[in-house]
Every structure is written in structure tokens, then in C-alpha cells.
Image (spheres, helix red, strand yellow):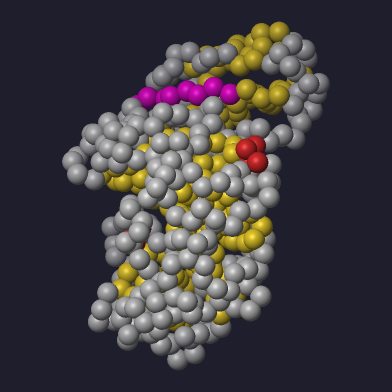
């Protein structure tokens, strides 16, 4: 599609005569468009030099890379064993729509994850787990940049059913994955946030795991869930190395004291979690919140900034059956339209604020204070006060909801005591659109911030 959505630039079918599902896509400019999914078509299109050009039985994973114009195959391969590499039967929340994960490294290697019931899935020598342990295990595999070799592949699971829902690659090429499990003995690591399965009989727990680039070492693994069904559909990481996950969960899912919503609203809520996987037990959980109404709500996807942001923003997208799903003033649509609606949400300051920031020149100011902006909301000029316990170098800036600096109001040494500042959002030097903004005060290694809403 064109940037403004007005033109269809290219589109293509991809499949064989049976059932073919593309569930993940990754766009790397140097490599083309990479797609993964599952198929039971014996004659799904593959390329001559593919790692595996032949269907192995039941549903196989496929990994296909197309050129940027979608006009030709760069490579296309099957991946699997004689059993099924896809099954939604055991996962209660449309697992086939969030199955596996896909990511492409800077060198063009492809990482793909999912679940397998095959006893002969092609795990590679030296992999973390080379045999299936349950009736269904998770897997993660790495294909060469040309799609002609399986560089590494491992099972991952306990004695019951396990599946990867999403994965991401960190700059070190370590692999982070999220998913769900019925296994009470899923491998966990020492010092993980939670080494115990909490699902009641017939329920599943979420999990988060991290592997080295060649999936021979399990670097971190934790359960993440309560007593009902918990599924972690999406995973990402930020510049701190924190792992951000979203999904849907029930009673007992872990949340933090600064959660947007610490109350379970019923029938499965969307959830958002930030983990700092350092092996410090309960301290690894930096943020956890519910998000939902009285119907069933799920967070299928998330995005975090690629660069540092003072507001720690996370964008979520998902589905809801809740007529009372939370919306904000000025939203595109604040009314549930019936059945299942899509939703999007932006949350800020989700758990990274305890990371020490580089000190600003000047003494430490324990009594630093930024007063509330007035009026708020506002359609015009806004006034606010700052109070300094001693003379210091001060910075005051206006940031948008993505953490981008919109305007710098102050950047100089200021005497101690109270000072009143003002901001005119309609200032022609830096006119801003209606929306949510943040005033941030920095002085002496301390910070304070306030939210302000600009009306139309």
C-alpha cells in the first residue's frame, strides 16, 4: 500500500491447493519481504535450492522471502516433521491467529518459532533440546540468509503442551520468545521471575524465554501467569534490554503497584508486562497491568520505540468484546460497534523509570518540584511553577506521547526558589496539534513531569 493508503502498489497470492495461512511478516529493505505461516499443501511453492522443498506431512511451517515488489520468490522452504507444526485445538484464544513468530537478522538470517507435534522435527546437533518432551513442544529455528540451510533448531518444552506465540531478536542476536504452556515442568532458569506453574487444572500459563543466537543455551526462562488461561501473543524489547510482552490473561495474573489497572475486569483481559530478565526473582517484574472491560479482551500486537524515550511508551493493538473497554477523550471511536471490535492504545511510563539517568550538571536537588499546569486541558497558554531548593542548571521541555522533544522552554542556570513559566501551544515557532503532552523538568540529577492535554 502507498503511504497514505490510497493506492495498492503490489499484492500477491501465496499458496497451494489446500489450506495456507500466512501469520507473520518481516520487512527488511535489504532482504525483501519475509513471510511465515503453516500449510498442508503438498505443492506449496518452494525454490530449487530451498532447505526443504518437500512437504513432510500434516501441517508444515513455511518460510518464504519475496522480492520488495512481491514479483518473485527469493527463497521458499518447508520446515517440519511428519506430525503437525500447527494446532489451535489446545489453545483457547484463537491460537492459530497468533501462532509462532518471525524475525530477520541484520545479515538476513531468518528466525521462526511455533509449535510442533512431530517426533522428527529437525532439531540440530548441539541444540538446547533435541527431542520432543510432551505431546506438543515449542520450537525455534534459524535459517541461513539464502534459505538454503537450517543453521540451528531446538525443541523447547515440558511434559505437556507448549507453543511459541512470538519472538524478537535483540542487537546481540539473542532470541526472546513468548508463548503459552500446559507443562508444569517447563524449563526455567535460576533467579527467574517465577519458576512455578500457576494454572489450575485445564488452564495454561504464559512464559518468556531467551536463547543465545544458535539456540544451544537457555539464558532466561520464566512462567508468567495466574490461575486461569494466560497467553502472551507479542514480545519486543527496548533500548534497556527490557522485555515487553502483551496478551490476554485471567485471575491472578501479576501486576505492579503502578499499573494502569490492577483489577481483573472479567472474561479475560488484555495484559501488558515489562520484565528486566536479570535473574533477580520477583524484582525482574518492572510493570504489569490489566486493560479491558467486562467482555473478552486480547492484546495481539505491540510496538516500542527503537530509541530511548523518557516516557517509556508502548503501543498496543488487539480485539475486544467489551462495550465498556476504556477509551480516551477525542478518540477516533469511543463506542463499541458490536461483536468483536479492534482497538489500539498508547500507554506511557510503563516501568522503566527506575533506571538511573545521567546526572545533569549541578547539585542533587531532593526538593525539586514541578507544579500542576493550569488550565488543563487547555486550548491556549498554560502556566506552571517550578520550585528549586538551590541554584542549579535547569532544563524544561515539552514532549509528545511518543517521547519526542517538541519544544525546549528553558536550558540555563536558575536561582533557587519558585519560578512561574508558561507555554503557548499555538506559538508559531513550534505549533502543536491537539493531544497529550508532557512537561518535563530536569535539575541536579532529579526529574519531575506533568501531563497536559491540548484541545482543538
> What residue occupies the far top of the structure in this picture?
417
**Nearest the camera: 234 or 200?**
200
Please provide the residue range marked out in magenta. Answer: 449-456
Point 19% across, 44% down: residue: 339
Residue 204 to residue 217: above or below: above
Rendered location of residue 271, percent (x, y)? 43, 40
The location of residue 150, given as percent across then percent down, is 56, 80
> Is residue 62 in view from this perspective?
no
- Residue 2 position by quadrant: bottom left
Q: Position of residue 402 (x, y in %)?
A: 51, 39
The residue at 48%/13% (across/down) is 374
Q: Main secondary structure of the magenta part?
A: strand
- Is residue 451 one of those drawn in magenta? yes
Query: Where residue 104 sits in the image (x, y, percent)?
Result: 54, 67
Residue 252: which quarter of the image? top left
The single residue placed furthest to the bottom in the displayed view is 48
Q: Is residue 146 above or below residue 248?
A: below
Q: Residue furthest left?
A: 338
The stretch drawn in magenta includes residue 96: no
The C terminus lies in quadrant:
top left
Amino acid at each position: 500500500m502507498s503511504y497514505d493508503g490510497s493506492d495498492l502498489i503490489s499484492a500477491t497470492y501465496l499458496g497451494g491447493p489446500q489450506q495456507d495461512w500466512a501469520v507473520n511478516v518481516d520487512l527488511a529493505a535489504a532482504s525483501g519481504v519475509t513471510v511465515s505461516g503453516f500449510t498442508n499443501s503438498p505443492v506449496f511453492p518452494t525454490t530449487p535450492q530451498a532447505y526443504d522443498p518437500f512437504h513432510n506431512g500434516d501441517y508444515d511451517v513455511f518460510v518464504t522471502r519475496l522480492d520488495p515488489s512481491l514479483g518473485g520468490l527469493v527463497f521458499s522452504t518447508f520446515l517440519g516433521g511428519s506430525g503437525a507444526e500447527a494446532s489451535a485445538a489446545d489453545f483457547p484464544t484463537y491460537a492459530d491467529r497468533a501462532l509462532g513468530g518471525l524475525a530477520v537478522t541484520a545479515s538476513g538470517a531468518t528466525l521462526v518459532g511455533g509449535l510442533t507435534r512431530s517426533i522428527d522435527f529437525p532439531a540440530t546437533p548441539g541444540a538446547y533440546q533435541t527431542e520432543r518432551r510432551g505431546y506438543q513442544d515449542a520450537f525455534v529455528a534459524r535459517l541461513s540468509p539464502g534459505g538454503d540451510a537450517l543453521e540451528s533448531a531446538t525443541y523447547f518444552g515440558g511434559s505437556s503442551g507448549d507453543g511459541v506465540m512470538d519472538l524478537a531478536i535483540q542487537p546481540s542476536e539473542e532470541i526472546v520468545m513468548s508463548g503459552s504452556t500446559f507443562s508444569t515442568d517447563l524449563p526455567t532458569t535460576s533467579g527467574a521471575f517465577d519458576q512455578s506453574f500457576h494454572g489450575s487444572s485445564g488452564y495454561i500459563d504464559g512464559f518468556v524465554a531467551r536463547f543465545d543466537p544458535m539456540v544451544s543455551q537457555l539464558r532466561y526462562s520464566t512462567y508468567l501467569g495466574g490461575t486461569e488461561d494466560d497467553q502472551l501473543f507479542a514480545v519486543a524489547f527496548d533500548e534497556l534490554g527490557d522485555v515487553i510482552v502483551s496478551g490476554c490473561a485471567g485471575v491472578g495474573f501479576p501486576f505492579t503497584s503502578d499499573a494502569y489497572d490492577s483489577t481483573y475486569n472479567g472474561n479475560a483481559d488484555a495484559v501488558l508486562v515489562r520484565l528486566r530478565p536479570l535473574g533477580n526473582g520477583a524484582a525482574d517484574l518492572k510493570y504489569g497491568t490489566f486493560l479491558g472491560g467486562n467482555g473478552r479482551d486480547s492484546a495481539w500486537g505491540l510496538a516500542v520505540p527503537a530509541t530511548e524515550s523518557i516516557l517509556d511508551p508502548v503501543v498496543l493493538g488487539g480485539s475486544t468484546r467489551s462495550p465498556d473497554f476504556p477509551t480516551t477523550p477525542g478518540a477516533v471511536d469511543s463506542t463499541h460497534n458490536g461483536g468483536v471490535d479492534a482497538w489500539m492504545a498508547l500507554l506511557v511510563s510503563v516501568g522503566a523509570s527506575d533506571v538511573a539517568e545521567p546526572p545533569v550538571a549541578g547539585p542533587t536537588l531532593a526538593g525539586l518540584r514541578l507544579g500542576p499546569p493550569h488550565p488543563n486541558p487547555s486550548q491556549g497558554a498554560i502556566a506552571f511553577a517550578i520550585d528549586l531548593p538551590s541554584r542549579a542548571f535547569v532544563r524544561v521541555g515539552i514532549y509528545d506521547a511518543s517521547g519526542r522533544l517538541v519544544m525546549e522552554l528553558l536550558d540555563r542556570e536558575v536561582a533557587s526558589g519558585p519560578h512561574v513559566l508558561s507555554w503557548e501551544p499555538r506559538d508559531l515557532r513550534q505549533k502543536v496539534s491537539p493531544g497529550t503532552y508532557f512537561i518535563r523538568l530536569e535539575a541536579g540529577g532529579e526529574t519531575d513531569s506533568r501531563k497536559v492535554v491540548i484541545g482543538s
